[in-house]
Image (cartoon, grey):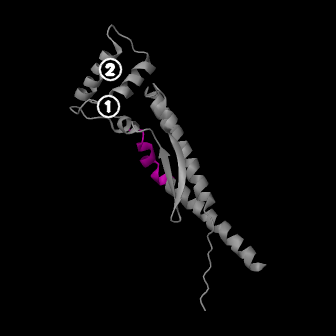
Amino acid sequence: MVVVVKIINKMTNIEKSLLKFGEELVADMKIILETAGKDATGELIRSLEPYTEDEDGLTFLYINMAAHGVYVDSGRKPGLKRPPKEPIRKWVQAKGIRGNISEDSLVYLIQRKIGIRGIKALPFLNLFYDAANELAEIVEESAALDIEQNLDDFIKKYNK
């Protein structure tokens, strides 16, 4: 006779720890972006949101981010085609940039400049990679707590 016992029911401590870690990481990312003046429209900062998902018994930490966050993080190489108009228009309006030319002309000039010179990177996502060792310790401690709690629950059920 073979007896199979499912000991681990839930990894709630891991999920909570990952989410807390993600929230702290996002808070640090927001500080970097604000300090560097990358908060003109606030869209990128508002979009940063940690969440966890369970997939095949594993819990993953994800961070939502507006699509243009990739360009803020890694920059944009010079010599590429011009970026789209509308995000630049929103940025110009949020910054309140005015000139002796029309808004369309201003947007065009900014597009051209970005296409020619690129954009300097602000690698704020490196925080995640820099904290990998800390994250490993957090997950290890949380997993130990989850296993202990699940074993206690199993023993209580078994003793009844």
Q: Residue at x 39, y 20 (%)?
A: 92
Q: Which residue is mark 1?
A: 120
Amino acid type of disc 2? Val
User: Residue 48 versus residue 30: which sits nearer the camera?
Assistant: 48
Q: Which mark is residue 107?
A: 2
Judge whether residue 122 can be spotted in this image.
no
Q: Quadrant of residue 141?
A: bottom right
Image location of residue 114, percent across then percent down: 28, 27
Q: Quadrant of residue 110?
A: top left
Q: Main secondary structure of the magenta part?
A: helix
Image location of residue 119, percent across then percent down: 31, 30
Image location of residue 138, percent across then percent down: 55, 55
The span shown in magenta is 122-134
Amino acid type of disc 1? Lys
Q: Earlier in the sequence, mark 1 or mark 2?
A: 2
Q: Is residue 5 left or right of residue 56?
A: right
**Measured along the vertical axis of the image, is residue 121 above or below residue 150?**
above
Q: Is residue 109 left or right of residue 13?
A: left
